[in-house]
Amino acid sequence: MSKTPKLLGIDAMNTFADTFCADLHCHSTVSDGVFTPDDLARRAKDSGVTLWSLTDHDELSGQAIASETAREISLHYLTGVEISVTWAKQTVHIVGLGFNPLDATLVEGLRQTRAGRAQRAKRIGDRLAKLGMPGAFEGALTFAGNPELISRTHFARFLVQAGFFPNVQAVFDRLLKDDGPAHEPMQWATLESAISWIHGAGGVSVIAHPGRYKYTPLQFGALFDTFKDLGGCAIEVITGSHSVPQFKEYAQVARHYGFQASCGSDFHSPEESRIELGSLPPLPVDLKPVWQDLV
């Protein structure tokens, strides 16, 4: 498929950006969402999405059915993944889009990245037991389809079901945030490795929801500089994880660094997510959408 020319006037760029209602960040039961990949594709279609990507955490096993279902229902699809990265002692998420999901180096890198989740989950379970919430590890497993991908979200869902907290966000706020009493740190992939895997598989890399990270302005500058130096090309500007003022803030970051712009709801479930699939406002018209050279 031929690519759209990279050099476009503003009018042509705006027309291209308006071609799609894009949602390029969401999660299925393969990681920590509540809908299967095929059901999520249909939900995206029914919600008005015309360009979609499934971006499960550190796992590609949902890509085939997501792509197949999207094709059946005439929904444009880009392969996707959200890779967990450790940078400056914090977890950063890098979204990959438009890659070959069978690339051996990418597949192996993701396998290694998620390999420590099960042991980490047992340690979280031990912490929760000491805090008066026994059986959390076993309970979290009932929400996780794959023990290799058990996450803090699965623990939160169990604790809500067990009546300890009213909702998932409350669990994170009280126990599971990065400095919470039940949090267990994890050494994820390096930023360099994640970008290398994505690009080696023919895709593009995107910093997911930068507004969620607790960096100083100096650290943010170093992150964006390093990401760009490694070949990273885009950041999420419009996302369900950002506030409206952050839409404007990270649009300006994209302009300053010359990043392309991405958008995605970060949808997990109707009850837990801040926004539904396909419900985001459009990207600012002067920013180049990340999908322009992929579709």
Image: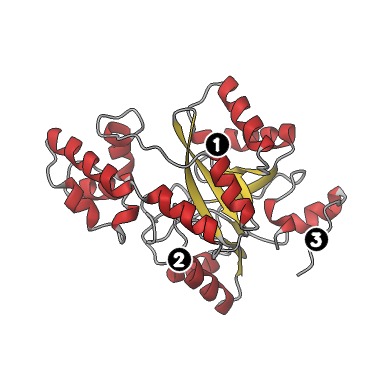
Give the SS element for disc 3.
Answer: loop
User: Decide: marks 3, 1 in contact (CB < 8 A)?
Assistant: no
Give the SS element for disc 2.
Answer: loop
How far apart are the two marked residues, 1 and 2, measured between alpha carbons? 25 Å
The reply to whether residue 239 is in sight is no
Residue indicated by mark 2: 62
Give the SS element for disc 1.
Answer: helix
How dense is the environment of label 3, judged by Cα within 10 Å: few (below 14), some, or many (20 and up)?
few
- The spot of residue 126 in percent (x, y) is 17, 39
Say if 39 sits above or below 164 in the image.
below
Residue indicated by mark 1: 210
Classify residue 291 by image quadrant: bottom right
**Amino acid type of the residue that numbered disc 1 sits on in the rendered structure:** Pro
> Quadrant location of the N terminus?
bottom right
Residue indicated by mark 3: 4
Nearer to us in this view, 85 or 287: 85
Nearer to us in this view, 295 or 21: 295
- The spot of residue 164 in percent (x, y) is 18, 41
> Which numbered disc, 1 or 2, marks the residue that appears first in the sequence?
2
- The spot of residue 131 in percent (x, y) is 15, 33
**Amino acid type of the residue that numbered disc 2 sits on in the rendered structure:** Gly
How dense is the environment of label 1, judged by Cα within 10 Å: few (below 14), some, or many (20 and up)?
many
How far apart are the two marked residues, 3 and 2, measured between alpha carbons? 28 Å
- Of the two numbered discs 1 and 2 in the rendering, the one whose residue sits closer to the viewer: 2
Classify residue 293 by image quadrant: bottom right
> Quadrant location of the C terminus?
bottom right
How dense is the environment of label 2, judged by Cα within 10 Å: few (below 14), some, or many (20 and up)?
many
Q: Is residue 216 left or right of residue 160?
A: right
